[in-house]
Image (tube, helix red, strand yellow):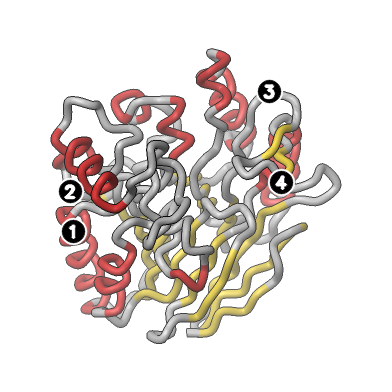
């Protein structure tokens, strides 16, 4: 069994609203909800094998108030109470607070010692690990192609900016207004070809060894598990790698705080977790996934529904 949680977006700030101004965000409360999740996970019998944190662990507000390091220390202190590894994927809010170079030296760099790393070029934060026989987890870096988190003088930044400007003619690149492909906004990102090639090799290995694979990344990669805006830029490329193999059973994402789910045409479950940040204080948004030979069972808390995912 393993724990799942997404979009905590903690900040020591009064409640606010999302960019559309219609969904309340409980910045301060999100830390309390994280502690509730940690308590519940710590009580699991038998103990969990690990926890997956799907990105946006602290909010971009922290960068404006100079509180990034302090806020990060607080969420990591909560997760640090667990006696099991916590694997982090990086979202846009990580990059609003820290550079990639800094993130590598924080507790959000969860690549285990000895883990098989992703493509070394351009400091891509992708890796995979096998917690038990014939089961593998792949952590993808959905902001490998992005203008957030990339130094403005880097080739990857310019490549990403060029792509954005081709697809998004708005003055504000965070606005999807009037776009044919509304996912091409600055708060999203994508996967480089180098990462996709590496991903393909990992899945080839898992096919050959008859493994079941769970993939996680901050951004959803299936339109039916999202809202059309909150999607990886080149989601089709990631899907096509997954669909050329037999081993992937589930793709876990965050980013879309309302959550989403679909079973795709190749039998892969796409689960987008509801975000803690927009969860009222009396509720919660986390889950535990129990893995069996032929299915995964999600026991959700609060806004996250229970679900049985057969494979």
Q: How far apart are marks 1 and 2 (CA)?
A: 6 Å
Q: How far apart are marks 1 and 4 (CA)?
A: 40 Å
The secondary element bearing badge 4 is classed as: loop
The secondary element bearing badge 2 is classed as: loop
Residue 38 is at least partly visible in this image? no
Give me the disc on residue 168: none
The secondary element bearing badge 1 is classed as: helix
User: Does the CB distance between marks 4 and 3 fall below 8 Å?
Assistant: no
In the shown orientation, is residue 63 left or right of residue 130?
Answer: right
Residue drawn at x 46%, y 26% is 97
Residue drawn at x 43%, y 78% is 268
Q: Name the residue under label 4.
A: 22
Q: Nearer the viewer, mark 4 or mark 2?
A: 4
Q: Name the residue under label 2.
A: 119
Q: Which of marks 4 and 3 is in front?
A: 4
Between discs 4 and 2, the one toward the N terminus: 4
Reply above or below: 298 against 100: below
Percent coordinates x, y for residue 109 in the rendering: 38, 36
Near mark 1 (Cα within 10 A), the count class, few <14, some 14-19 or many ≥20, is some
Q: Name the residue under label 3.
A: 12
Near mark 3 (Cα within 10 A), the count class, few <14, some 14-19 or many ≥20, is some
Near mark 2 (Cα within 10 A), the count class, few <14, some 14-19 or many ≥20, is some
Q: Name the residue under label 1.
A: 198
Q: Distance between the residues labelled 4 and 3?
A: 21 Å
Q: How far apart are marks 1 and 3 (CA)?
A: 39 Å
Q: Which of 283 and 297 is in front in this view?
A: 283
Q: Nearer the viewer, residue 58 or 187?
A: 187
Q: Nearer the viewer, mark 3 or mark 2?
A: 3
Q: Which of 123 and 24 is in front in this view?
A: 24
């Amino acid at each position: 069994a393993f724990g799942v949680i997404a979009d905590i977006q903690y900040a020591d700030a009064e409640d606010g609203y999302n960019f559309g101004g219609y969904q309340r965000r409980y910045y301060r409360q999100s830390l309390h909800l994280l502690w509730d999740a940690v308590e519940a996970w710590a009580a699991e019998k038998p103990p969990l094998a690990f926890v997956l944190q799907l990105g946006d662990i602290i909010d971009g507000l922290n960068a404006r108030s100079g509180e990034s390091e302090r806020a990060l220390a607080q969420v990591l202190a909560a997760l640090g109470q667990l006696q099991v590894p916590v694997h982090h994927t990086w979202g846009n809010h990580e990059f609003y607070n820290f550079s990639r170079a800094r993130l590598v030296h924080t507790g959000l760099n969860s690549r285990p010692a000895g883990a098989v790393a992703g493509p070394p070029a351009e400091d891509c934060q992708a890796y995979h690990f096998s917690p038990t026989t014939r089961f593998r987890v792949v952590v993808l870096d959905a902001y490998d192609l992005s203008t957030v988190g990339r130094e403005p003088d880097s080739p990857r930044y310019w490549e990403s900016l060029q792509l954005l400007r081709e697809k998004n003619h708005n003055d504000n690149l965070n606005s999807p207004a009037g776009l044919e492909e509304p996912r091409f906004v600055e708060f999203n990102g994508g996967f480089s070809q180098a990462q996709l090639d590496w991903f393909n090799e990992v899945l080839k290995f898992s096919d050959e060894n008859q493994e079941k694979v769970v993939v996680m990344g901050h951004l959803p990669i299936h339109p039916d598990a999202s809202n059309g805006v909150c999607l990886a830029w080149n989601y089709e490329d990631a899907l096509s790698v997954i669909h050329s193999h037999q081993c992937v059973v589930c793709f876990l994402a965050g980013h879309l705080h309302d959550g989403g789910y679909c079973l795709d045409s190749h039998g892969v479950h796409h689960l987008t977790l509801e975000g803690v940040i927009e969860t009222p204080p009396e509720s919660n948004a986390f889950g535990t996934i129990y893995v069996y030979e032929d299915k995964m069972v999600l026991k959700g808390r609060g806004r996250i529904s229970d679900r049985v995912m057969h494979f």
